[in-house]
Image (tube, rainbow, N blue to C red):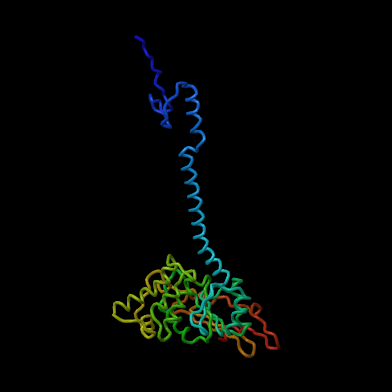
């Protein structure tokens, strides 16, 4: 009887008998089949490399999107800072800004016919920005008012009263500003807006806006906190905002939490300083001090030197009124 010998089972790449990666039948020449089977997969990119490439592309896309999203607020901040963070509180009457350069301030005074510049940074005679601001303001014939506020301090009741009086009495049109035009300026702009007939509580909150670079954290939380307390008082009494109610709250019901200058043993800063150019070329200076001033402060407070004040063209040169004459 003849005997038929079957070829040995073929072992493919997987190492299993009778199995092949491509599903074809094994050849009787194992060496050739083995070579073909080991080179064919090398012509394709292994799956792990393809996945890595996809992840890299996804990461790049996500990074580009994140940069684009961040570029929008960064551009806004840069634009608002370069433009002086200018804004309109009431058209033709009240405007707001950050600290402006002397040339920008001078142009704004002329273009908007400003009669008053209200500086919420307070008098700083030793600082170049302050003397430059005074020169630009007075040379343009406008009144300069200093009311020192701190963005990390709640208003004292005396400061609130001073602001109410100033907003009622200052000559318009007027510019209100601090250093960045966001926090202190936002508070006083909100007060000014809410003192106008027909205003709503939302009109006040609109002055605390991202468009003015306001962010309600840290110092910003303190400044907008005044409006929040007023809104809570209205809600507790079942009332809606009106200019009369705002005045009543500030003058009779407002109590500042700490920190506030009201809790200081004495106040080294004046409540208000007003510089007014007179027709004869002199500059009148009026100082208003708090009810608890530090005695040594009043005696040593530096006054702007007459040499630092602007000089008008013509025979009448502005001069600072002699100390003690105002």
**Image check: 39 left or right of 8?**
right
**Image check: 263 left or right of 319?**
left
Can you say which quadrant of the picture contains the N terminus? top left
Taking 8 as reference, is 303 above or below it? Answer: below
Residue at 47% across, 76% down: 293
Q: Which residue sits furthest bottom? A: 279
Residue 190 in the image, given as x and y percentages of width and height? 44, 78
**Image check: 248 left or right of 118?**
left
Q: Nearer the viewer, residue 321 or 32?
A: 32
Residue 71 in the image, given as x and y percentages of width and height? 52, 61
Residue 264 visible in the snapshot:
no
Q: Nearer the viewer, residue 197 or 158?
A: 197
**Image check: 157 left or right of 287?**
left
Can you say which quadrant of the picture contains the C terminus? bottom right
Residue at 37% across, 14% down: 4
Residue 68 in the image, given as x and y percentages of width and height? 51, 59
Q: Which residue sits furthest top? A: 1
Residue 273 in the image, given as x and y percentages of width and height? 53, 80
Residue at 50% across, 80% down: 272
Residue 129 visible in the snapshot:
yes
Taking 76 as reference, is 206 above or below it? Answer: below
Taking 79 as reference, is 33 above or below it? Answer: above
Q: Which residue sits furthest front? A: 1
Dividing the picture into quarters, in which one does residue 251 lie? bottom left
* Numbered label tally: 0
């Amino acid at each position: 009887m003849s005997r038929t010998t079957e070829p040995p089972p073929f072992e493919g790449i997987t190492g299993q008998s009778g199995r092949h990666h491509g599903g074809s039948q094994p050849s009787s020449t194992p060496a050739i089949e083995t070579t073909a089977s080991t080179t064919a997969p090398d012509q394709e990119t292994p799956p792990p490399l393809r996945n890595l490439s996809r992840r890299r592309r996804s990461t790049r896309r996500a990074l580009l999107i994140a940069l684009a999203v961040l570029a929008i607020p960064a551009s806004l901040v840069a634009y608002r800072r370069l433009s002086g963070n200018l804004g309109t509180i009431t058209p033709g009457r009240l405007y707001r800004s950050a600290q402006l350069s002397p040339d920008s301030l001078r142009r704004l005074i002329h273009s908007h016919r400003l009669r008053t510049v209200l500086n919420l940074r307070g008098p700083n005679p030793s600082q170049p920005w302050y003397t430059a601001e005074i020169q630009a303001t007075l040379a343009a014939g406008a009144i300069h008012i200093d009311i020192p506020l701190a963005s990390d301090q709640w208003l004292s009741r005396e400061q609130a009263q001073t602001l109410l009086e100033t907003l009622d009495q200052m000559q318009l049109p007027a510019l209100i500003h601090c250093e960045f035009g966001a926090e202190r300026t936002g508070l006083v702009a909100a007060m000014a807006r809410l003192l106008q007939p027909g205003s709503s509580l939302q009109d006040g909150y609109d002055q605390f806006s991202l468009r003015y670079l306001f962010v309600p954290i840290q110092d910003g939380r303190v400044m907008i906190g005044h409006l929040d307390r007023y809104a809570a008082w209205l809600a507790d009494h079942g009332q809606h905002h009106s200019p009369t109610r705002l005045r009543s709250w500030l003058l009779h019901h407002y109590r500042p939490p700490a920190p506030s200058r009201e809790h200081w043993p004495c106040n080294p800063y004046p409540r208000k300083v007003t510089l007014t150019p007179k027709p004869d070329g002199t500059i009148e200076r009026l100082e208003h001090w708090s009810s608890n001033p530090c005695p040594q402060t009043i005696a040593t407070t530096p006054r702007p030197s007459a040499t630092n004040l602007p000089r008008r063209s013509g025979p009448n040169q502005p001069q600072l009124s002699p100390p003690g004459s105002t």
